[in-house]
Image (cartoon, rainbow, N blue to C red):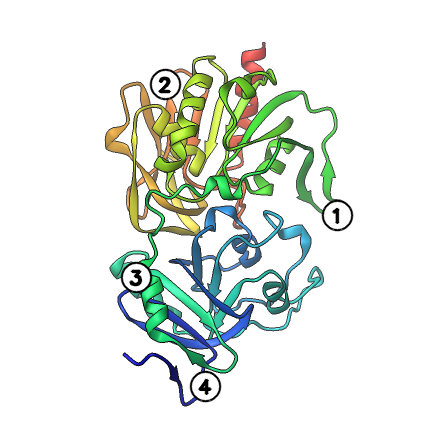
Amino acid sequence: MPASQTASEKPTALIALADGSLFYGRGFGATGDTVAELVFNTAMTGYQEIMTDPSYAGQVVTFTFPHVGNVGVNPEDDETGEPVAAGMVVKWDPTEPSNWRAAENLVTWLEKRGRIGVGGVDTRRLTRAIRQQGAPHVAIAHSPDGVFDIEALVKKARGWSGLEGLDLAKDVTCAQSYRWDEMRWAWPEGYKKAEGNDLKVVAIDFGAKRNILRCLASAGCDVTVLPATATAEEVLALNPDGVFLSNGPGDPAATGAYAVPMIKNVLDTELPVFGICLGHQMLALALGAKTIKMNHGHHGANHPVKDLTTGKVEITSMNHGFAVDSQTLPKGVAETHVSLFDGSNCGIAIENRPVFSVQYHPEASPGPQDSYYLFERFAEAMRARRA
C-alpha cells in the first residue's frame, strides 16, 4: 500500500476501515483526521440532534437518508452545547438550508465546531460493511488538496482501542450541578419555563440530552442535574422524590465502576428510579445483570419495541451499541420491553416497586410520541410515594 495517494478525480476525503477498506468522498466541515467507531443511523430527520447527542461520543455516524443539510441548523435543536459525534458520512453533499428555522448551514456549523464531514459516499455499501463485520474502527480524513497518507490512516484505525472498556460518560457529563426548568417545545411559544413544579428529581448526567430534561420538567419535575460521578450521599442530600439515570456513551461496565455503587445505595431507599439508555444499562448492572457489545447496535428513529406488560408496540428512537443481556436478569426483575427487530432487551422493572428503565429514547419523538407515558409514569410513582 503506498504511503500517500492522490486520486485522479481529487477526492478530498477518505474513510479508512481497520480491515484496509477505503471509501473516498468529498470533505466538508473541519479538515484533518480523527479515529472512531463507525455506525449507521436510519433516521430521516434530526441530523443536528444526532450530531449533538452525547451518546455518540467516539463514533462517526453514517446517515442512510440522503437529504442531509436541507433544514440547516439552529441553536434550539442542539441536544448539548457542541457536537459530540466525531464526524458524519452522507451520500449527497449537504444542501443549502430551506427552512424558516435555519440559523446557519450545516457545513459552516461543522467547520466552526471542528467536526469532519464526508459526502459523495455509497452509504448503502458502507452500511452493508458495518452490518457484516460489526461496527468497525475507522479513521476519517478531510484534506482539501486530496493527498492522504493511507498507510498512516489505516494504522490509526487498527490501533484504536475501541469502545469496549471505555468510560466516556466522564468526558461528556456536566462539570458541576445545575437546575433545569425548560419544558418541551410547543407551538407557538417554543420552549417555556416550568412554574410550580413540586416533584424534586435528581438527574444523574451520564451524557444527558436536553430534551430528556425538558420532558421531566413538562411532567412536573423540579430537576437538579448532578455529574456522573455523584455519590449516593450527594444525591440523597438533596432529598429527592425520585432519581433519574440519563443516557450516555461508552461501555456501561466501565462507567458502572463508580455509578453502580451509587445506584445500589439509592435503591436501598425505596425511591422511584427511572433510567434511559445508558441509565437503563446502569440500573441493570446495579441489579446484578450484565451488558454485552452488539454487532452494530441500534441507531435510528423507526425501531419497533413491544411493551410486554400491555402488548402494545411503540415506534421508538434508539442509539446504543451495548445491550442488557436479558438472560442474566435476576429474580424479581422483569423484562418489560423487547425489540421487534432482534428480540434484544429494551426495558426492565423491579417487580412491585417504582423502579424501571428503557433502552430506547422516549424523549426523541421521531414523529410519534408513543413513549412519553414513561415520564408520566415516573411522576405518578413519585406522587404515589409522597401520598
The answer to whether the residue labelled 2 contacts the one labelled 4, judged by CB atoms less than 8 Å apart, is: no
Question: Who comes first in sequence, dot 3 or dot 4?
Answer: 4
Amino acid bearing label 1: Pro
Between the C-alphas of marks 1 and 4, the distance is 47 Å
Between the C-alphas of marks 1 and 2, the distance is 41 Å
* Residue with the mark numbered 3: 158
* Residue with the mark numbered 1: 188
Examine the rendering and report whether any part of residue 310 can be seen: no
Please state which of the two labelled residues, at mark 1 or mark 4, is closer to the viewer. 4
Q: Position of residue 102 (x, y in %)?
A: 69, 62
Examine the rendering and report whether any part of residue 183 can be seen: yes
Residue found at the very far bottom of the displayed protein:
8
Amino acid bearing label 4: Lys
Amino acid bearing label 3: Arg
Question: Who comes first in sequence, dot 2 or dot 4?
Answer: 4
Between the C-alphas of marks 3 and 4, the distance is 25 Å
Residue 351 numbered tag: 2
Where 283 sits versus 166, above or below? above
Q: Label 1: state its secondary structure.
A: loop
Q: Residue at x 52, y 43 (%)?
A: 172
Between the C-alphas of marks 2 and 4, the distance is 61 Å
Q: Label 4: state its secondary structure.
A: loop
Q: Label 2: state its secondary structure.
A: loop
Q: Label 3: state its secondary structure.
A: helix
At label 3, counting other C-alpha atoms closer than 10 Å, the crowd grade (few under 14, some 14-19, many 20 or more) is many
Q: Residue at x 40, y 48 (%)?
A: 303
* Residue with the mark numbered 4: 10
